[in-house]
Image: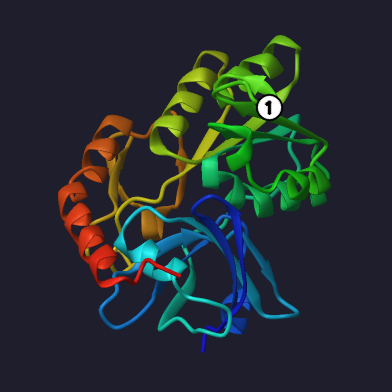
Amino acid sequence: MYEILKKEELSPHVYAMEIAAPRVAKKAEPGQFIILRVNEEGERIPLTIADFNRETGRILIVFQVIGASTMELAALEVGDSLLDFVGPLGHPSEIRKLDGTMVVVGGGIGVAPTYPIARAMHEAGNKVIAIMGAKTKDILIMEEDMKAVTDEVLVTTDDGSYGIKGFVTNAVEELVRRGEKIAQVTAIGPVIMMKSVAEATRPYGIPTVVSLNPIMVDGTGMCGGCRVTVGDETKFACVDGPEFDGHAVDFPGLMSRQRMYRDLEAVEKEHVCRIGLGRK
C-alpha cells in the first residue's frame, strides 16, 4: 500500500511525491494534512496535502530534506511504498465567495499547500493573487502551477534574483499600496514568515489565516505535542487546526516549542548519514 508513483526534485533538497492513497484522496480537502511513516522505526511526519486527485486516487506531498526522517523519505524511489499514510486530518480550509480579493502567501515549500487552496477559492468565483517567496530564484517551486489557478502571481526573492527583491511582506505591502481590496490572506511557510505576514496585515485589519505544522505524534489530539496558544486558549493543531487566526497565535511560544528537539534531531540526522540512508 501507499506506493510512490512519481518522484521529482523540484529544487535542491525539495521533493514532490505522488502517493497511491485512494481512500485519503476520496475525502481530502484543501488545507488538510496527512501523517506518514516510512518504516517501523520511523517517526510520524505531518505534511499538508499539496494536491489530490479523487479519480486516480493520488495524493501529492512536497517536503524538504532537513532531518533524519525526511532524509529517509527522500531515499525512497518510485515503486517503493510507505508503511503508514494517515489522513485526511485536520479541518479543511473554508472555501467561500469573498467580498474582495483572496491572497495566498507561500514561503519556501509552503507554496505547495497554498496551491489547492488557491485553486478552490478561484473555482468559488474569487479573484486570487498568489505571493510566492524564496531565498533565490533557483529554489522557487510551482510557479507555473500557481499561475494556472490564480489571477496574478507575485514572486519575491531575498537576493532580488527574480521578481520583487525582499520578502513576501514587501509584496503584501505593495498590494495594499495599489489599493487592492484584500478580503483575506492565507499564509503558509516557516513560522517566522507567517508571523511577519500577520504583523504586516494587522494594522490594516485584514483577516489573516496561518496553517501551523508543529511537532506532532499521533495526530488525534491525544499526545498534546502540537499544542499552541491562540488568544487565551490552548489549541491542538492536529484537531483544532491546522488553520488559525494569525493575529491571535502566540508565535514566540510556538517558535520556542519548535526548537525543543533540535539537538536530538541533529544526533539522529548524523546517525542516518553515517549508515547511508540519506544517499540515493
Residue plotted at (28% across, 63% down): 273
Q: Is 184 displayed left or right of 266 in the figure?
A: right
Which residue is pictured at 63% across the width and 34% down the height?
A: 137
* Residue 224 is at least partly visible in this image: no
Res. 224 image quadrant: bottom left
Residue 26: give x, y in percent of width and height: 65, 77
**Quick check: 190 left or right of 112?**
left
Q: Decide which of 199, 267 is in the foreground and name it.
A: 267
Q: How is the image coloured?
A: rainbow
* Left-right relation of 82 to 28: left
Q: Which residue is mark 1?
A: 162
Please provide percent x and percent y for residue 149: 80, 48
**Closer to us: 222 or 114:** 114
Q: Residue at x 53, y 50 (%)?
A: 12
Q: Is residue 107 above or below residue 266?
A: above
**Residue 109 appearing in the image:** yes
Q: Residue at x 75, y 79 (%)?
A: 55
Q: Amino acid type of disc 1? A: Tyr
